[in-house]
Amino acid sequence: VQLEESGGGSVQPGGSLRVSCAASRALVSRPCMGWFRQTPEKEREGVAFIDSDDIPTYADSVKGRFTISKDNAKNTLYLQMNSLKPEDTAMYYCAAARVAARGSWCQRWAETGYWGQGTQVTVSS
């Protein structure tokens, strides 16, 4: 399975972006998927996840600003990012678990599953 992210780019603070992640083929039924981000200065951070029951979880740093969703029929994951801040600047990676997973297990299983190559998001004035 290959994951391909798209939709990154540059935006001013307060702006919005939507990044997408398309899987090359069907994953497990109702997959657990999510987004990580990383910069050279920081450790990788789990940003948002949507589990096999379609229940989302978010890092505290993005709650209220980011929304994760997925289209199981299209094998596609989305991350809508609003009210972007300079500290959101990072490479954003999509990940998908190889098994169904719920709750906090979703991030853990996604981390050891399939990964995309990343898409850069830059927030700067």
Image (cartoon, grey):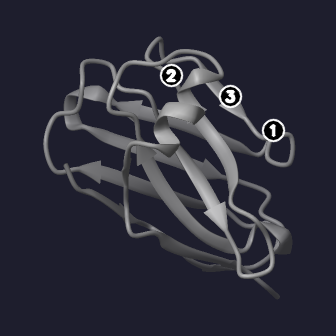
- Packing grade of label 3 (10 A; few <14, some 14-19, many >=20) is many
What residue did someone put label 3 on? Answer: 57
> Is the residue 18 above or below the residue 98 in the image?
below
Q: Residue furthest front?
A: 112
Mark pair 3, 2: CA separation: 8 Å
Mark 2 element type: loop
- Image coordinates of residue 21 in percent, x first then y, are 37, 53
> Is the residue 31 above or below the residue 124 in the image?
above
Q: At label 3, which amino acid type do we have?
A: Thr
- Image coordinates of residue 85 in percent, x first then y, are 83, 67
Q: Which of labels 1 and 2 is toward the front?
A: 2
What residue did someone put label 2 on? Answer: 51
Q: At label 2, which amino acid type do we have?
A: Asp
Q: Earlier in the sequence, mark 3 or mark 2?
A: 2
Q: Residue at x 72, y 82 (%)?
A: 40
Mark pair 3, 1: CA separation: 9 Å
Q: Tell me if label 1 and label 2 are in contact, CB under 8 Å.
A: no
**Location of residue 65 by image quarter:** top right
- Packing grade of label 2 (10 A; few <14, some 14-19, many >=20) is many
